[in-house]
Image (cartoon, rainbow, N blue to C red):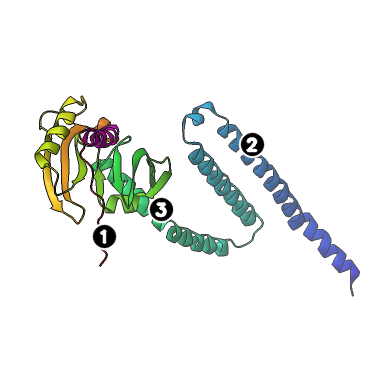
Amino acid sequence: MDWQALLTGVTDFLRTTGVRILFSLILLFVSFRVINLLARRIEKKKKLKRYDKTLTKSFLYLGKILAKTLVTLALIGYLGIDTSGFAALLTSLGVGVGLAVNGALSNMAGGALILFSRPFRIDDYIEVSGYEGTVEDIRLVATRLRTIDNKVVYLPNASVSSGTIINYSEEPFRRLDLPLTIGYETDTAAVRKIVLSLLSRDPRVLHDPEPIITLGDYSPSGAELTCKAWVKNEDYWDARFDLLEAIKESLRAADIRFPGTRIDLV
């Protein structure tokens, strides 16, 4: 074995390729440190604090990854290594990411449609996709609802924009339907008089249109009446709960009792 030739070859390698590798490693280390330093400085900018923290952190992280990838590919090319394989790999990764975010893109398109068509606005009370609540935020890919029992629901914008939306807040007034069941022997006219008198004294109940009481159906328990009155949207829930309680107490004071379910045993 020619040790002299081997030593010469190793020396030549270190003088040429070895120096390039060492220089590339040093440059890679310094570049990564600079990228991390710039990202931290950008993150501390006061102007960025006005924007969504989640979005700024995500974009900064993606920017760091992209910058480090470009530096790495440039140094690999500097060492004389063919980067066409890396380009093919990045292309495959891009296709995979595109398929992965396909659902997110449809949600973004749904969000744009919601903002453009305006079926509801922030602070509206809506029903959509089986959920009811107040709209707190319309985000890029999801709409945030807060339910009456203080649950936060995030609904994908794709399903919201393509589903049926009931907006309870779009109109300034809302009809209040109060169910009432009375026995068949009870005087319906007397019940109407008591309940309508109660509704007329409540300042939240509008007089135009006037409240009415209709007979809706018959059941084994008795006759089913419905008290229909109009109130302002913001008074709906309070008026509903208060009037249900007041109607029960008023009928009890007039010695009118609500019927129970009757079961005949033979």
Left or right of residue 28, residue 148 in this image? left
Against 159, is 35 above or below?
A: above
Residue 40 is drawn in which quadrant?
Answer: top right
Q: Nearer the viewer, residue 78 or 153?
A: 153
Instruction: Please name which of the two marks, 3 or 2, marks the residue nearer to the observer.
Output: 3
Q: Which residue is mark 3?
A: 104
- At x 68%, y 48%, the residue is 28
Q: Which residue is mark 2?
A: 37
Q: Position of residue 74 (x, y in %)?
A: 60, 52
User: Residue 215, labelled with which disc?
Assistant: none
Mark 1 vs 2, N-terminal side: 2
Left or right of residue 249, residue 34 in this image? right
Count of labels in the image: 3
- At x 43%, y 61%, the residue is 99
Residue 230 is drawn in which quadrant?
Answer: top left
Mark 3 vs 2, N-terminal side: 2
Left or right of residue 207, residue 258 in this image? right
Boundaries of the magenta span: 238-253
Q: Nearer the viewer, residue 191 or 185?
A: 185
Distance of label 1 from label 2 (alpha carbons): 80 Å
**For mark 1, does the 10 Å Cα neighbourhood hold few (<14), some (14 to 19), or many (20 or more) residues?**
few
Amino acid tagged 2:
Leu
Q: Quadrant of the N terminus?
A: bottom right
